[in-house]
Image: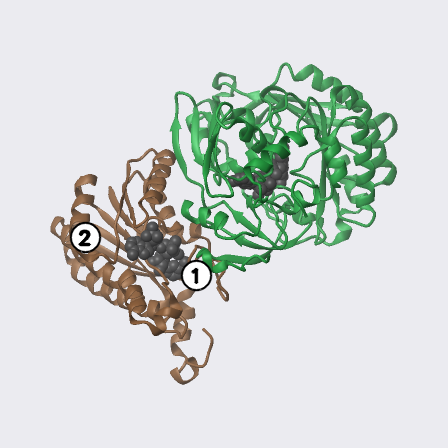
Chain colours: A green, B brown
Amino acid sequence: MNPGDDQDRSAVHYKHTTLSGWGHFPALDCDLYRPEKVSELAEIVTGNSSSVIARGSGRAYGDAAVNGGNRVACLTRLSRMLAFDAESGILRCEAGVTLGEIIEVFMRRGFFPAVVPGTRFVTVGGAIAADIHGKSHHRDSSFGAHVKSFTLMLASGEIRRCTREENSDLFWATLGGMGLTGVIMEAEIVLRRVESAWLQGETVVASNIDEAIEAFERFDPIYDNSVAWIDCLSKGSALGRSALDVGSFAAPDGLPSSKRQQPFRISHPRRPTVPFNFPAFTLSGPMVRTFNSAIYINYRRSAGHKLFDYESFFFPLDSIGNWNRIYGRRGFVQYQCVWPLAESRAGLIETLEAITNTGRGSFLAVLKKFGQQQGMLSFPIPGYTLALDFPVADGLMEFLERLDAMVLSRGGRVYLAKDARMRAETFAAMYPKLAEWQQVKVSADPSNRFSSSLARRIGLSPQ
Amino acid sequence: MRVLILGATSPIARLLAGRFAQDGASLYLAARDSGEAQRIANDLAVRNGVDALSGRFDAADFSSHGEFVQRVVSELGGLDGVVLAFGTLGDEDAAQVAPGAALSTIHQNFTGAVSLLTLLARILETQKHGFFIVIGSVAGDRGRARNYVYGSAKAALHAFTQGLRGRTERSGVHVMTVKLGTVDTRMTWGREGAMLTVSPESAADRIYAAYRRRAEVVYVPWYWRPIMGALKLIPERLFKRTNF
Ligand SMILES: Cc1cc2nc3c(=O)[nH]c(=O)nc-3n(C[C@H](O)[C@H](O)[C@H](O)COP(=O)(O)OP(=O)(O)OC[C@H]3O[C@@H](n4cnc5c(N)ncnc54)[C@H](O)[C@@H]3O)c2cc1C
Ligand SMILES: NC(=O)c1ccc[n+]([C@@H]2O[C@H](COP(=O)([O-])OP(=O)(O)OC[C@H]3O[C@@H](n4cnc5c(N)ncnc54)[C@H](OP(=O)(O)O)[C@@H]3O)[C@@H](O)[C@H]2O)c1
């Protein structure tokens, strides 16, 4: 059935438009709704029998919040903060509130989201649906670990409250469930207490992958946050050379006196913006090589103990508006995988070698160690995770399938919030709790009202 | 400061209320949809730590306005300013053929505003201070085939607030008329041919800045003034054949 066949039943307007994720690939035509009232959301979900998927800020890289030929409900206008309890740090808010807004309101009161990804523009709904991880995963696990409850709108329009005790199957299926169990409307999340906007930490340089792993093992018990930037073009004995940033929120007495007076204040530099899609040649091999080396050299110079402001520590890319445009019109694909701990070293070496051999430089390559898993389809498992960017180019899809096979053979998996191209068979083999998840999906959404381009591609809902 | 927001569920009004809240104002958020108004009140309270009340009113239900205004004033403990943001395009096709639909659009944009502004002006005038921010539209500057019913209501609202300004200025009550261009809200979402659309954030910031400098008639954004100025110069003979 075509979307819009029964448009007259729903008075809510939509915009027919081309939608994509942050990677600009794939870009598909959808009917985009943007409810501004709770009642409008119910009309969108129940007023039309074609499929619909919720969308937050569209920061997932691939097609998770895209529903080609069907409907998408963007929740960014349902962004009301409803209650806050300073005693427990629990915030109740609507799903469209972004983590950036939470920081803006609560940093100065001494609270910060317990888990933040590499950009502050994601919504609470998107953070739950992808069960996102941050630089503190080894300590705090994923976003879901700090969610007390949420309300979910089912296909019937019925609203269910889900917690670890109440509707717990829906709770665990929705964490990491990529919007396919229903629309998350409100959530209660626990904010962490912080004493300043600064992180006390270090930058550590590792000259190869073994030193990098050693550094994670050494620093993770000491610091709350850790992340490494890998130069993924270096080869041989320098394979995996990287720079590690580690840090924990600082107490005011750890700050220099100039900052102690106003510990929550940092200066916000003006954001430069990438004004248009770059032409394809700019990200050619030599450019990426120069960039990667420059980063590495710059880090080597600045290694040692440091004070980071939270923005440059957690959200370095947010300081450049629309940075995704540097990849040009064809867009790019992120590839993020994780290997079980025992297979991580071998998996990393194998993957980095495959990249250096083909000369497909990744502009950004990020390494991180994970702790415990949450939801049924949540991505993180204990082990090392590698995130890579590749501009869309001939032969890329075949290359990534080779990486898939390598990751799968070691019991690893690929992250759905970054994915734009994985095959259904590969996905099914990577996520062992899929059958359990399917059971919850069938009972909560028997007619597959909630579907997305991602869901159809990887077999989470029928074609 | 105590401010009443009429039509609080408009995203422009919500953000404008946020600007007042940041400056410490107590707010009363009123709309037909009182559940939504309450959510917005909670949001303003959580974000800004101010008192925010909410309640229901219907612009077209004139007989309820007296009691509504009394309730607002007593709950807020007084009144220092009013933002009038309610309005609707209504059913444009129906309004062209059915008098009932046309009158409904007029009531929700104009007559209802006349009723409320008259009641509220009495209060502000008596206490000799206060302000009105009235959201009109560039659609009121020239009647267009597509939405002239709405446009005529806004034109009437402009003239009404103009006169009100002349009268209440003497008792220290300031009236600002906002002639708003296209803003990205549910009113324009998915409509064809929307031009020069700005975000509600940008609209609210500009309106608040104009309020702070005590503007009288302000186009938001400013470039609608020359655009509408030029449009008004097109002879009727030509204009009626255009697609504006
Ligand atoms: C620069 C950058 C850095 C990133 N770093 C990280 C990182 O460090 N760790 C990490 O885990 N991720 C990271 N991401 C990915 C991002 O955190 C996730 O994709 C997140 O889900 C995006 O949230 P969003 O609000 O943009 O949601 P969208 O991208 O719009 O949607 C993502 C998914 O959430 C679902 N969804 C959104 N809202 C709702 C709702 N209300 N109810 C039900 N389902 C909903 C959608 O259906 C979709 O499946 C990064 C992304 C970028 C662009
Ligand atoms: N968006 C634009 O491009 C644009 C351009 C020019 C001018 N404007 C004007 O800007 C103002 C805000 O509009 P918006 O774009 O933000 O649209 P909106 O979201 O539809 O807001 C309209 C507001 O009016 C209220 N309202 C409508 N009918 C009402 C009634 N009978 N009684 C009480 N409240 C009523 C609505 O509340 P409930 O639904 O809860 O009742 C809502 O708060 C309006 O005056 C509009 O005319 C908008």
User: Horizontally, is A71 left or right of A363 in the view?
Assistant: left
Q: Amino acid at mark 2?
A: Ser
Q: CA distance from mark 2 to mark 1?
A: 31 Å
Q: Amino acid at mark 1?
A: Thr
Q: Which residue is mark 1?
A: B182
Which x, y percent locates residue A428?
Answer: 73, 34
The residue closer to the viewer here, A449 or A132, is: A449
Q: For the residue with label 1, is its CB less than 8 Å from the closest atom of ligand 2?
A: yes
Of badges 2 and 1, the one in the foreground is 2
Among numbered discs 2 and 1, the one appearing first in the sequence: 2
The residue closer to the viewer here, B7 or A391, is: B7
Where is residue A215, by image quadrant?
top right
When the figure is inspected, residue B4 is found, relative to residue A225, above or below; the finding is below
Residue A69: which disc?
none
Residue, x 60% and y 25% (percent of image)? A374
- The residue marked by circle 1 belongs to what chain? B
Which x, y percent locates residue A348?
Answer: 79, 27
User: Horizontally, is B160 left or right of A327 in the view?
Assistant: left
- The residue marked by circle 2 belongs to what chain? B
> Secondary structure beneath disc 1?
loop
Which x, y percent locates residue A197?
Answer: 50, 27
Pointer 2 local density, CA inside 10 Å: few below 14, some 14–19, many at least 20: few
Q: Which residue is mark 2?
A: B64
Can residue A422 be seen in this snapshot?
Answer: yes
Residue, x 37% and y 34% (percent of image)? B46
